[in-house]
Image (cartoon, rainbow, N blue to C red):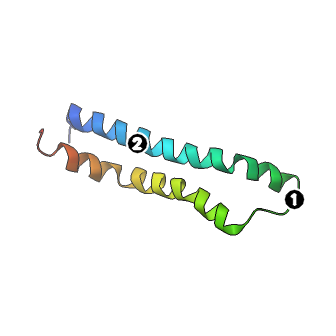
């Protein structure tokens, strides 16, 4: 099945946004990684869980990116 150019563009944009969320979460965890490598106690668990929210959102959007792109471009085909 050949995908339309609109579907490909939407899929690229959605995956780019999802990658941005995952990278944002990795940058938030950057300082905690150095604390963990230096064997210091981790920060509060609540702060670590809040930093994980962008990664969860990014992975969920990436997982459903094909369905989201089809939904957005169904009227353009």
Residue occupying the far right of the picture: 39
Residue 44 higher or lower than 75, as above or below: below
Q: Is residue 35 left or right of residue 11?
A: right
State the image quarter where residue 41 is shown: bottom right
The count of marks equals 2
Q: Secondary structure at mark 1?
A: loop
Callout 2 environment at 10 Å: few (<14), some (14 to 19), or many (20+)?
A: many
Residue occupied by mark 1: 40
Indicate the position of residue 22 as horizontal and vertical percent values: 53, 47
Residue occupying the point 40% across, 52% down: 61
Residue occupying the point 12% across, 38% down: 76
**On-image quarter of the C terminus:** top left
Callout 1 environment at 10 Å: few (<14), some (14 to 19), or many (20+)?
A: few
Residue occupying the far top of the picture: 5
Q: Is residue 56 left or right of residue 38?
A: left
Residue occupying the point 29% across, 38% down: 10
**On-image quarter of the N terminus:** top left
Indicate the position of residue 58 as horizontal and vertical percent values: 47, 51
Residue occupying the far bottom of the picture: 45
Please name whichever residue, 2 or 49, is drawn nearer the observer in this view of the structure. Answer: 49
State the image quarter where residue 7 is shown: top left
Please name whichever residue, 26 or 70, is drawn nearer the observer in this view of the structure. Answer: 26
Indicate the position of residue 36 as horizontal and vertical percent values: 81, 56
Residue occupied by mark 2: 15
**Of circles 2 and 1, which is in front?**
1
């Amino acid at each position: 099945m050949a995908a339309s150019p609109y579907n490909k563009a939407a899929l690229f944009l959605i995956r780019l946004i999802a990658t941005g969320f995952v990278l944002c979460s990795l940058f938030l965890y950057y300082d905690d990684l150095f604390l963990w490598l230096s064997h210091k106690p981790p920060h509060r668990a609540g702060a670590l869980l809040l930093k994980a929210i962008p990664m969860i959102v990014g992975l969920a959007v990436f997982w459903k990116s094909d369905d989201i792109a089809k939904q957005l471009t169904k009227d353009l085909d």
